[in-house]
Image (spheres, helix red, strand yellow):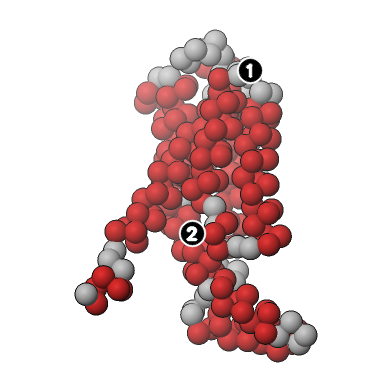
Amino acid sequence: MSFIAEPLGRLLLMVYGIVGNYGIAIIIFTILVKMIMIPLTIKQTKSMKNMQEIQPKIKEIQKKYQNDKEKMNEKVMELYKEHNVNPFGGCLPLLIQFPIIIGLFTVLRQPENYGIAQEIVEAGFLWMPSLSAPDPWILPVLAGATTYLSSKTMSSAKGAGGQQESMQKMMLYFFPLMIFWWGRSFPAGLTLYWVVSNLFQTVQQLAIHRPASLLPHKGSEAK
């Protein structure tokens, strides 16, 4: 991932050169990277929303043709075509974002490899004596809580059912606990990135969904 980590490392170093504080640099750096990825996130969110909206019709087809898998698949594909939905539309943005996330983790776990001096990383920030050492409680708790908040905002459980819904609910509670546990061993700088990233993601998702919720319903328009 060096071809991704290198430019990210230079960006973080440039931001630090402007603000002169490693903790603030991580916060600004995180926001900049998340802003760059906004088009991909919006595309992924819209694709997931479109899939969610046609889930009831897919269930009807599955129930109707449960004994004829070939016919069922044919009807489902017709439904995708009718509603202009790509079942893999949410995967491509995610696949593009994944290497970027790995690159971010690489930079923030070993920032000294990208021109950021060790004494800069070891400087204190807020209540933390060093951003190179793990914060045992406060930051991991914030990481777990914001992970839950972000997952809850993005959750499509209402459009799911059965085993899929159960899996989503399990991940909704299990993943934050896992992030909390990891956060107790990660460098505080990396956990700080995760907290800021989750907060940005939550606000972004609320902003994406809010305009649709403000639109008048068809029934009210008819009146």
Tell which of 119 and 79 is nearer to you.
Answer: 79
Residue 117 makes an appearance in the image: no
- Residue at which label 1 appears: 136
The residue under the point 54% across, 69% down is: 51
Left or right of residue 73: residue 114: left
Crowd rating for badge 2 (residues with CA inside 10 Å; few <14, some 14–19, many 20+) = some
The residue under the point 56% across, 73% down is: 56
Residue 31 location (% of width, % of height): 42, 38
Crowd rating for badge 1 (residues with CA inside 10 Å; few <14, some 14–19, many 20+) = some
The residue under the point 61% across, 50% down is: 98
Residue, far top: 129
> Which structural element holds mark 2?
helix
> Is 173 situated above or below 90?
above
Quarter of the image for the N terminus: give it. top right
Tell which of 102 and 45 is nearer to you.
Answer: 45
In the image, which disc is placed on residue 45? 2
> Is 109 situated above or below 213?
above
Residue 20 location (% of width, % of height): 40, 19
Left or right of residue 69: residue 27: left
Residue type indicated by callout 2: Thr
> Which structural element holds mark 1?
loop
The residue under the point 64% across, 41% down is: 173
Residue 107 location (% of width, % of height): 59, 33
